[in-house]
Every structure is written in structure tokens, then in C-alpha cells.
Amino acid sequence: MIVRQHNKGWEIISQYAHGLLAGKIAAPFQNLIEDNIWIDLLTSIIEHDDNLPNFNKEDHITTAGAPMDFTLQEKDLENSYLHATRVYNSSIQKSQFIALMVGRHLEFLFKDKTKGHKQFSEFFEHVRSERKTQLNLYDLNAESLEKYYDIMRFCDRCSLIICQGLIPSNGRKIEINKTIDNKEYFIMKTGENKLRVTPWPFAVKNFELQYESRIVEQLKFKNDEELESQLQQSGIVINTVEIKK
């Protein structure tokens, strides 16, 4: 989960909501993508962070009792391996193209962390082996895969920046990443809930995004169960931002 300080306590955004926002950011790319794979690409972007552990299987509070942002969680290789296999096995039930994209993303996240974990190394050997079949099935090459994955990584990063509240004030910009068409992208505030991306990669001149968060007023928690209970009872906020050329 993504945790931000709030004047009433904590603002918490689930990583599922972050994935949905990434999909909404991808929507304006539709006119640039072939119709036969568009929905599959969009699904892979929305679901790239799904199949996370349950509350009772992973710590979600800090030693001080605060809700723990995902960036503070120290996942061991075994938990990372289990997460990766869950995400990939789920994606492969939908389509080989979705599995192709998810497998590429998992490789980006974890490929340098598999040393010393035989099963994790074997998993990525399996993913790369299946990738050849998946590319042939959709009549794609490695260059095409990277083109679609650049869009996925751009949308993922852009969503995270928005959800984490990382965009500076006073018209300063923050880098998104270097992805689509090998260009370096930035995002900045231009007003209240108004953002600009440069250079402009989308097929439309402007669009509006909404994503949900929860406001939790309790500051400290005894355990994950108490945090989960408070999250279920907390008020939902719909956040709206406009992205304009």
C-alpha cells in the first residue's frame, strides 16, 4: 500500500488502486495501439501489481505502529518469488500477451535479485523460454515487446508519482522516466489538481483521472488486524487530477 501523511492522520492508496490509475493513464494511448492487443495491454497495465499477500501474511505496520508504505517493506527473496509466480500464473490464464507483458515487468523488477535462489532463477528461465512462443503467437519481435513495455513502465511510474504525492510545488518538475520513443519525460503541477507532462506522448490534448484513497485518522496500530479493520471502516476519497498538454 502507498501511505501519505494527512492532516487528519494517514492517506492510504492500495496498490490495486495504483494499478487501476496506471491503466487510466494508458487509456489515451489507445489510438496508437493495434486493436487486437489493446485490451490485453491495458489489462496487463492495470493488473501488473495484483496478487499481493494478505494482511495476515505480511507486516503492514512499522515498528512505531504506523501504516507501512510499500517502499519500506523489505521482502525476502522467497516472498518476492511467491509474488512473482502468483502474478505470472494469474496473467497466463487470461492471455499469452498479458503474460508476455507481466513477465517482462517481473524481469525488470526482480531479475537482478535472483542470485542465491534457485527456484527464482529457474522461474525467469521459464518466463524467457515462454516469451519466444508468446512473441511468435502474436507475430511480434523483441523490438515490439519493448515498445509496448515502454508504455507500461511509463504509466506505472507516472501513477506512482501521482499516488505518492511526489510532484514538487512552484512549477518544478520531476522526471517520470526515459521510455517511449527513447525520450525523457517529466511531470509538473500547473495549478490545483492540474498537471502537465513533457514532452507530450498522448494521442489526446487533455484528460481527467480519478483514483480512490482512504483517510485513516488513527495514528498508531497494535497489529495488522487493527489496521485492516480501520481501513475497512475509513472514509473513501475520490481524487481528481487533470493532465493537459
Image: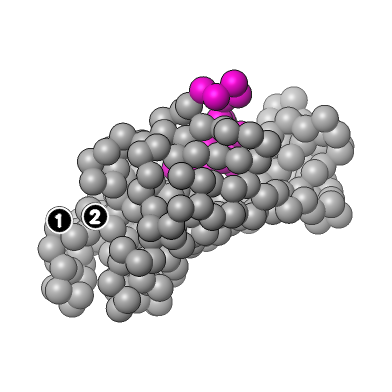
The image quadrant that residue 85 belongs to is: bottom left
Find residue 193 and report its horizontal and vertical position in percent: 65, 40
Report the front residue among 182 and 100: 182
Left or right placement of residue 244 versus residue 179 in this view:
right
Q: What residue type is labelled 1?
A: Glu
* Residue 46's disc number: none
Report the front residue among 211 and 122: 211
- Inspect this view and state whether residue 239 appears: yes
The image quadrant that residue 97 belongs to is: bottom left
- Quadrant of the drawing holding the N terminus: top right
Left or right placement of residue 4 versus residue 126 in this view:
right
Instruction: Check contact, mark 1 vs mark 2: CB within 8 A.
Output: yes
Q: How far apart are marks 1 and 2 (CA)?
A: 6 Å
Circle 2 packing at 10 Å, graded few (<14), some (14-19), many (20+), is: some
Q: Is 214 rendered above or below residue 103?
A: above
Q: What residue type is labelled 2?
A: Lys
Find residue 232 and report its horizontal and vertical position in percent: 81, 56
Q: Residue at x 84, y 51 (%)?
A: 234
Instruction: Kindly state the secondary structure of the residue where label 2 is placed.
Output: helix
- Inspect this view and state whether residue 86 appears: no
Q: What residue sits right under mark 2 in the picture?
A: 147
Q: Is 41 rendered above or below residue 119?
A: below
Q: Residue at x 51, y 32 (%)?
A: 188
Q: Residue at x 28, y 47 (%)?
A: 180
Find residue 149 and report its horizontal and vertical position in percent: 30, 54
* Residue 143's disc number: 1
Magenta-drawn stretch contains 158: yes
Circle 1 packing at 10 Å, graded few (<14), some (14-19), many (20+), is: few
| Highlighted magenta segment, given as a residue range | 157-172
Magenta-drawn stretch contains 74: no
